[in-house]
Image (spheres, rainbow, N blue to C red):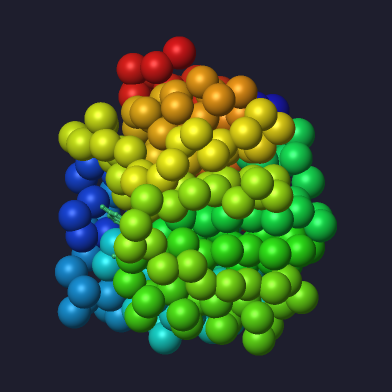
Amino acid sequence: MADEPNYKSELVGVFGHPVAENPTIVMQEAGFAALGLNWRYLNIEVLPEDLGAAVQGLRAMNFQGINCTIPHKVAVLQYLDDVSTDARLMGAVNTVRRDGKHLIGENTDGKGFLRSLREDAGVDPSGLRIVVLGAGGAARAMTVELALAGASHISIVNRSADRARPLVALLNDNTPTQATYVPWDVIFAIPSDTHVLVNTTSIGLYPNVTDKPNIDYATIKPGMVVCDVIPNPPQTPFLDEAAKRGARTLDGLGMLVNQGAIAFKMWTGHDAPVEAMRTALAAEFGVS
Ligand code: NDP
């Protein structure tokens, strides 16, 4: 006898404000299609004052999970049943998953970077000296994961001390890594013992695609691994300058794809079809 038809979709998506231009839908829907899953990803506009009601809506409609983007990554914590150790340390959630009746907060941004660093660049951060430009949300997520993965030293290079100092304290107080703050008031020279240099600032993000961080590019040496968080366009002037100096480079597209792939697995239980997701997102961004 033929199976009964099942027209019910499992639902996930993203809460944001604004949310219309968030491209994650493209890679998640490509992943669902590649595995033949009847799942839907929805971009849902949620005002800050409606976030609590929106999370209740997830519960009522039995959503399997949700991504949170600006301005909800911190505020959503108060509405969840539990939060993973790393997301609690970061104080930010970008992915909510369902565990029975419970909604659990996770953060896949730093995990996505770590997986891209390991799998795309072949680099294990354990025991390495890392220099991070920026101290915002992306830096917080990435440095917590780098520290938990055993990075020996992390320098946080940032314009404003009020964002950098709490991050340095958080890393020193909660992880085995040694973190230091470096004020970024003049052109920054990369220390010669640096293994991995990461731009986590928004410098170079569309439409300011010709901008690059104010560092002394002559101090980038062959053997260093240089990474950018900017996913679109992924080949940034920062990475071009690094490649010219013989450094290995890692773009932000891999981080974006991998943080989505980790969320995909948390939600569906299936290993994500990473290449199908990467191809869809690259096509959306007009890169090969
Ligand atoms: P935040 O606003 O939280 O932080 C921005 C950081 O950039 C701050 O440290 C800020 O310094 C610094 N910054 C901005 N402009 C300048 C400048 N002109 N000179 C020096 N420093 C500057 O943003 P997020 O951390 O959330 O995001 C940063 C970038 O990471 C964005 O472009 C985002 O798209 C990208 N991202 C990529 C992801 C991926 O998967 N590839 C995932 C998440 C984010 P200050 O503190 O002094 O203001």
Residue 45 locus on image (x, y percent) = 21, 58
Q: Is residue 188 left or right of residue 86?
A: left
Where residue 46 sits in the image (x, y, percent)? 22, 65
Q: Quadrant of residue 172?
A: bottom right
Instruction: Tell me: residue 46, above or below residue 229.
Output: below
The quadrant in which the N terminus is found is: top right
Say whether residue 271 is visible: no
Q: Residue at x 66, y 86 (%)?
A: 173
Quarter of the image for residue 106 reads bottom right
- 53 and 137: which is toward the camera: 137
Q: Ligand 1: give its quadrant.
A: bottom left
Residue 194 in sight from this viewpoint = yes
Nearest to the observer: residue 143 or residue 185? 185
Spot occupied by residue 277 in the image (x, y as percentages of width and height): 52, 29
Q: Is residue 135 left or right of residue 83?
A: left
Q: Residue at x 49, y 49 (%)?
A: 189
Determine whether, in the image, residue 260 is placed left or right of residue 22: right
Tell me: residue 166, above or below residue 1: below
Residue at left offset 46%, top offset 36%: 217
Query: Relative to 151, does residue 230 appear above or below in the rendering?
Result: above
Residue at screen point 74% across, 60% down: 151
- In front: 136, or 45? 136
